[in-house]
Amino acid sequence: MYEKFIKNNINLLSPSITKSFLKKKGIFVNDQEAAAITNIAKEKWPELYNKNYQNAFTLLKGKVSEDTHQKLLNLYLKTIKEYL
């Protein structure tokens, strides 16, 4: 169910949506980080959906701060545990 929804809507994701969502979760990113997160999410969503997140988070590592990287990983792990 979620997979089809994501597949049909991932192209609508934008850095501003990403930044706003993360802000609500207490994760504050700059515009450059929001763009990197959005691009990786768009490219790697099938892997992320299938709980194969290592590659995506490796790509993200150099594009966001260590603190942000860890917070994103924690959020991802919490979310997949809850919804997948």
Image (spheres, helix red, strand yellow):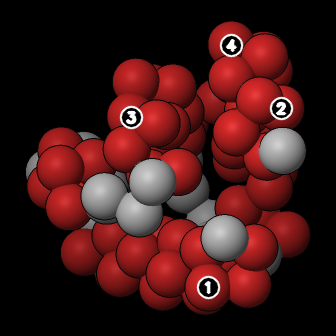
Tell me, for residue 81, which label it has, or none. 1
Nearer-N-terminus badge (2/4) = 2
Nearer-N-terminus badge (3/4) = 4
Question: For mark 4, what is the residue?
Answer: 11
Secondary structure of residue under mark 1: helix
- x and y percentages locating residue 17 in the rendered image: 79, 36
Secondary structure of residue under mark 4: helix
Nearer-N-terminus badge (3/1) = 3
Q: Is residue 66 above or below residue 61?
A: below
Question: For mark 2, what is the residue?
Answer: 5
Q: Is residue 78 above or below residue 58?
A: below
Kind of residue at disc 1: Lys
Nearer-N-terminus badge (1/2) = 2
Q: Residue at x 35, y 81 (%)?
A: 70
Q: Is residue 12 visible?
A: yes
Question: For mark 3, what is the residue?
Answer: 44
The N terminus appears in which quarter of the rendering?
top right
Q: Are marks 3 and 4 in contact (CB under 8 Å)?
A: no
Kind of residue at disc 3: Lys
Query: Closer to the observer: label 3 or label 1?
Result: 1
Give the spatial CA distance, label 2 vs label 4: 11 Å
Kind of residue at disc 2: Phe
Kind of residue at disc 4: Asn
Q: Is residue 14 visible?
A: no
Q: How crowded is mark 2: few (under 14 residues within 10 Å), some or many (20 or more)?
A: few
Name the side, left or right, on which 11 lies relative to 66. Answer: right
